[in-house]
Image (cartoon, rainbow, N blue to C red):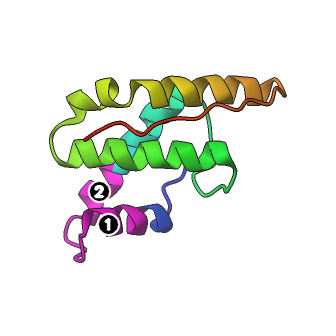
Amino acid sequence: MELTEELLKKFKGRMHISHSGEDDNLKELLSFSIAFVEDNCGEFDISGSANIDIRAKELVIERTRYAYNDAVEYFDDNFQSDILSLSLDMVFAKEGVTTTTTTTTGGG
């Protein structure tokens, strides 16, 4: 999965980071989070507009936020339902089954 400048910009906006001094570190954290979401949920298009892609991107951003704040160990517990829901929806999507799963974003 390719890390996009758009994703970096979105994360920096979420975290109110206006400088570029941490870009290399942020890119690394984002790439680790992309790998985490793909390993736990399945492959997705980081720049896609499908519901699954948007939800996966949100998980990437949230996990990166936790990693940036040295709290990644809390991410799994706080986002367990989101991870499970997305992974099930990805499996069903591969099989052509439509779902109506809704998720609630975890705390943090």
Picture residue at 44% right of the left edge, 42% below the top:
59
What amino acid is found at the position of numbered circle 1 in the picture?
Answer: Lys
What kind of element bears circle 1? helix
Picture residue at 62% right of the left edge, 47% below the top:
53
Q: Which residue is mark 2?
A: 26
Give the quadrant of residue 102: top right
Residue 4 x %, y %: 50, 62
What kind of element bears circle 2? helix
The first of marks 1 and 2 along the sequence is 1
Picture residue at 63% right of the left edge, 22% below the top:
88
Is residue 50 left or right of 59 when viewed as pictured?
right
Q: Between 52 and 5, which is closer to the camera in this rendering?
A: 52
| CB under 8 Å between discs 1 and 2 | yes
Residue 38 bears which disc, if any? none
Is residue 28 left or right of 91 when viewed as pictured?
left
Q: Which residue is mark 1?
A: 12
Q: Residue furthest bottom?
A: 18
Is residue 103 left or right of 107 when viewed as pictured?
right
Picture residue at 67% right of the left edge, 30% below the top:
90
Residue 84 x %, y %: 51, 23
Is 24 included in the stretch rendered in magenta? yes
Q: Between 14 and 26, which is closer to the camera in this rendering?
A: 14
Does 93 appear above or below 29?
above
In magenta, the rendered stretch is 8-29
Give the quadrant of residue 86: top right
Residue 8 x %, y %: 40, 63
